[in-house]
Structures are given as C-alpha cells and as structure tokens.
Image: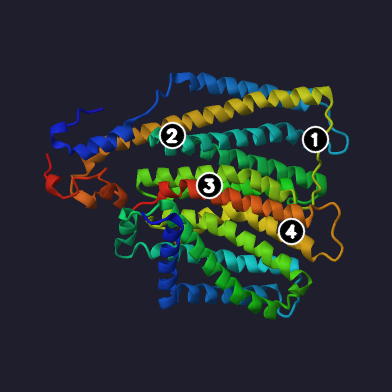
C-alpha cells in the first residue's frame, strides 16, 4: 500500500478505511493451479466411474447418469446458500466488508450451481417424461431457488455505495435463505410426478458418493477464488479512491447516510484543499 | 417516551392522512390493477369464464404490481424534505416505523383488493361464492406476508437509483412461496372433489400463516439495520 499522507487525510477517511481494509488472512495459495489440476483429475475419475463402473439403469438408460452430478451439485447449492447466509449475518453483526466479499462470492456460486441443478433436472425431465419442463415440485423448487440467487448479484450491481450495497445484500441474503424452506413447503403442495426415492445398486451408490468429492471441492475453490478476487478489488479501490477524488464533501459520491452519520464527515468542504 | 402502540398509531395516522389528502397512491394502484385485468382478459381470450384457482392467479398479478407501487410510495413520503432524518431523530422506536409502514401498506393493498376484485369478478365471471370466506382469508394472509417483505425492502432500496425496478426484483422472488401456497390452497378450496393426494385446506392455511410469521419476524428484526436518513 502506498504511504498515506495522514496529515492531509481527514479523520473520517481513516474511519471509513478501517472498515474497508479490515480483512481476514485470505490464506496461502492453497487453491492455486495444483488444486484445480487435482479437481480436474478427480472429475475425470468420477466421470469414468459414471460411464463404465456404474451399470446402466434399465428404464431410463444413459440419461440416468445425470443423477450422479445432479444430486451433489444440488446439495452443494444449499451449502453455498448457507455460506451466503452466514456471511450476511456476519456482516450485519460486525460491519466488516470482508464478510460482504464472502457473501458475494458464495452468492455467485449458488446461482451457478442452481443453474446446473435446473439444467440437469430439465434434461432428466426430457428423458423421463418427454418434456423439457413440468411444474413438478422439485423442478419448480430449483427454478425459484435460481431466481432467488440470480437476483442477488443483480441487486448488488444496482447500488453504488459499498456500505449500502453490503447492508441491502446482507439483508437479502438472510431473508432469501429463510425463504428456502418456505419454497420447499410451498412446492410440496403441488401435484408431483417426481420419483420420491430411488433404489440404487452398490456400484451406483459408490459412484454417487464419489461425485461429491470433486463437486464439493469445486464449490469451495470457486467461493474461495471469488472471495480473494473481491477482497483484492475492494482493497485496491480503497487505496485508489482517495488518490482519485479530492475531498470536496458530499459531492464525492458518498451516500447520504455516510455523510449524515459522520462516517464520511468532513463534508463541509473545508478539507477540499488538495494536498 | 410515548408507549409503543401509540407511536405506531401516530405514524400510521400520519401516513393515512397524507394518502387521504392526496389519494395519489390509491388512484395509481387501482388504475394499474384495472389495466392489468383488461390486458390479462384480452390476452387470455375475452369472455372465457375463469374458476377460483384462475381467479387467484389473475388477482395476484394485480396485487403484486400494485403492492410494489404502494411500498414504494409509502416510503417515498419519508424522502421528501428529509422527513426520514426527522423521524429517526425523534424519540420513536424504529420497530414502530416498520409496523406503521406495514399497516399502511396492508391498508392500501386491502383497498386495492376491495376495488379490483369486483372488477375482476365482472370481467372474468369468477364465481367466488363457492368459497368466498376461504378466498378472503387466503388472499389476506398472502397480502400480509407480501407487505411484510415489501415494507422491509422498500426501506432498503429507497435511496438507491433504481428504486422501483430494484424493489420488484427483490420482492417478487422472495414472495413466490406465498403465491404458490395461496394458488394451491385456492385450488383445493374451489375443487368440487378435492384431490386426496394434495395437501388439505387446513395445512395450506397453516403454511401461509407460518410464512407470514417468518416474513414478519425476520423483517421486523432487520428493519432498523436498513434505515438511513
């Protein structure tokens, strides 16, 4: 970080930066190239298991093998959504922006995984029922879940102030997670044609269990990589911002709340003198 | 300090007086609701009768869009002349602000429903007489849950540049469980021979009430975190 000319920076800026720059150790390069290489190898292995080790199911044939990816991705979608929830609660509790970085990272992964669940579910529906879409409870559940978490990054993009964005998206992250059981309950009211339970042969069970490893690793890796990227971008912006904008009070782009609450104080314009 | 119920009544009275004097919000949402009915009527095929299940779906479209406008307007009143800053500086609980805004929104939505529902009955030839009590209860529970979430996020986004669009984007996905529950319970209530495999009317109503409680409790808890002058 370049040395900050503290004598010329208003005290309010130091307060704002303290919250901005607070960040956990993002860790060693645990999730570097070798991690992704290992993940790719694991994916190749479980794909081989699905194709050659697990037997072909009699009624559905090859499309049944979608299930091996579908279930682990679905479970990891909930895990990622839970990370959004925890990070959102963490932000509302501590007001440190690194929680917001984590929530954002996990939110994107939730939306991505949810899209994969929906696509694999639709492919299954096409194979089982000859239609791409039915209003079956589980497909509807995936669709509503996708809508809930696709909105999350869009909301973030619509709010300029980082603090305001963090608050609104944290509240959304909490409410959206609380909404998930309600979505589940609501779709249970709909008529169902989805199989309620599937009997698997041992080889199928092994394959399904094996698929959890690379999918879970991918989820963790994606969340961590996104988190590091978000943190790095935020820190860079926090360092660059004072240099880019001379202190001219409320017109510097801060939200009204920051000005009113004094976090961005010094808004009188008296400190407008550029170093 | 003024007791909490009195705070709520004072704030609610203020909001309702503002609306009674201008009647801008209710005019806007009623006209919007009727327009939606006409568009849906023409789109679905003029003159085709609709059952109670379809009635719920059609009315929900009008209630959702009208509701978002209500939420936006009731919060916009506090943005004029920085009224929110004054409200936050006053010795008033922030929970009272939430409850009063929620009640104002519910009152506006009920007014919308009272006007738009008969219009829909006339246009689509709904026969709600078979289960009017169930219809009123299901829609009321749905509206309360919707207003609980809408009031929270109206406060959250009222200072952002997108406001209306953003509010709809936030609130619609969150309230989908309510829409699904109410339409499914309505299907059961209006069915001449209820499907034994589907969930009963009682469990559906219980789920709607549970959704309302979750929305109300979570919104109440986090409302004060999203308020800003």
Q: Nearer the viewer, mark 4 or mark 3?
A: 3
Name which residue lies at 59% across and 66% down. B63
Measured in 3D between alpha carbons, the distance from the residue under mark 4 to the one under mark 2, in whole angstroms, is 40 Å
Q: Earlier in the sequence, mark 2 or mark 1?
A: 1
Name which residue lies at 84% across and 60% down. B194
Quadrant location of residue A219?
top right
Q: Nearer the viewer, residue A23 or A236?
A: A23
Measured in 3D between alpha carbons, the distance from the residue under mark 2 to the one under mark 3, in whole angstroms, is 20 Å
Quadrant location of residue A93?
top left
Name which residue lies at 42% across and 55% down. B3
- The x, y position of residue A199, in whole percent, is 84, 31
Measured in 3D between alpha carbons, the distance from the residue under mark 4 to the one under mark 1, in whole angstroms, is 38 Å
Measured in 3D between alpha carbons, the distance from the residue under mark 2 to the one under mark 1, in whole angstroms, is 43 Å
Same-chain check, marks 4 and 3 = yes
Q: Which residue is mark 4?
A: B185
Q: Nearer the viewer, residue B16 or B2?
A: B2
């Amino acid at each position: 970080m370049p040395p900050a000319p503290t004598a010329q920076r208003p005290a309010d800026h130091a307060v704002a930066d303290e919250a901005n720059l607070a960040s956990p150790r993002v860790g060693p390069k645990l999730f570097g190239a070798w991690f992704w290489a290992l993940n790719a190898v694991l994916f190749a292995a479980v794909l081989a298991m699905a194709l050659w080790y697990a037997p072909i199911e009699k009624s559905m044939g090859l499309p049944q093998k979608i299930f091996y990816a579908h279930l682990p991705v679905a479970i990891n979608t909930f895990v990622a959504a839970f990370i959004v929830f925890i990070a959102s609660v963490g932000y509302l509790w501590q007001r440190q922006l690194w929680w917001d970085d984590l929530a954002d990272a996990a939110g994107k992964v939730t939306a991505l995984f949810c899209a994969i669940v929906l696509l694999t579910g639709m492919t299954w529906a096409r194979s089982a029922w000859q239609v791409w879409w039915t209003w079956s409870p589980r497909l509807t559940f995936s669709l509503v879940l996708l809508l809930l978490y696709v909105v999350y990054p869009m909301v973030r993009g619509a709010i300029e102030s980082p603090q305001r964005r963090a608050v609104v998206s944290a509240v959304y992250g909490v409410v959206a997670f609380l909404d998930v059981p309600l979505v589940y309950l609501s779709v249970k009211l709909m008529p169902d044609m989805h199989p309620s339970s599937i009997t698997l042969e041992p080889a199928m069970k092994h394959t399904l269990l094996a698929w959890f490893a690379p999918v879970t690793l991918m989820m963790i890796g994606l969340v961590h990589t996104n988190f590091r990227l978000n943190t790095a971008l935020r820190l860079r912006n926090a360092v660059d911002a004072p240099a880019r904008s001379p202190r001219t009070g409320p017109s510097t782009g801060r939200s009204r709340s920051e000005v009113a609450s004094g976090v961005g104080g010094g808004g009188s314009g008296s400190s407008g003198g550029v170093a | 300090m003024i007791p909490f119920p009195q705070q709520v009544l004072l704030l609610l009275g203020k909001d309702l007086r503002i609306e009674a004097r201008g009647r801008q919000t209710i005019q806007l949402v009623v006209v919007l609701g009727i327009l939606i009915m006409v568009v849906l009527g023409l789109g679905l095929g003029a003159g085709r009768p609709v059952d109670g299940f379809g009635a719920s779906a059609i009315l929900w479209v009008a209630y959702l869009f009208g509701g978002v406008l209500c939420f936006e307007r009731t919060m916009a009143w506090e943005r004029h002349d920085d009224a929110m800053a004054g409200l936050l500086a006053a010795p008033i609980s922030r929970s009272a602000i939430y409850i009063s805004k929620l009640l104002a929104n519910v009152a506006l939505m009920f007014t919308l429903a009272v006007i738009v529902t008969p219009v829909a009955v006339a246009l689509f030839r709904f026969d709600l007489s078979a289960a009017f009590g169930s219809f009123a209860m299901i829609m009321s529970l749905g509206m309360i849950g919707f207003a609980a979430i809408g009031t929270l996020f109206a406060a959250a986004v009222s200072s952002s540049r997108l406001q209306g669009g953003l509010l709809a984007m936030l609130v619609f996905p969150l309230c989908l469980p309510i829409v699904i529950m109410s339409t499914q319970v309505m299907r059961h209530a209006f069915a001449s021979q209820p499907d034994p495999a589907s969930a009963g009317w009682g469990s559906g109503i219980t789920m709607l009430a549970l959704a309302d409680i979750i929305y109300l409790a979570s919104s109440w808890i986090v409302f004060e975190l999203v308020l800003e002058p």
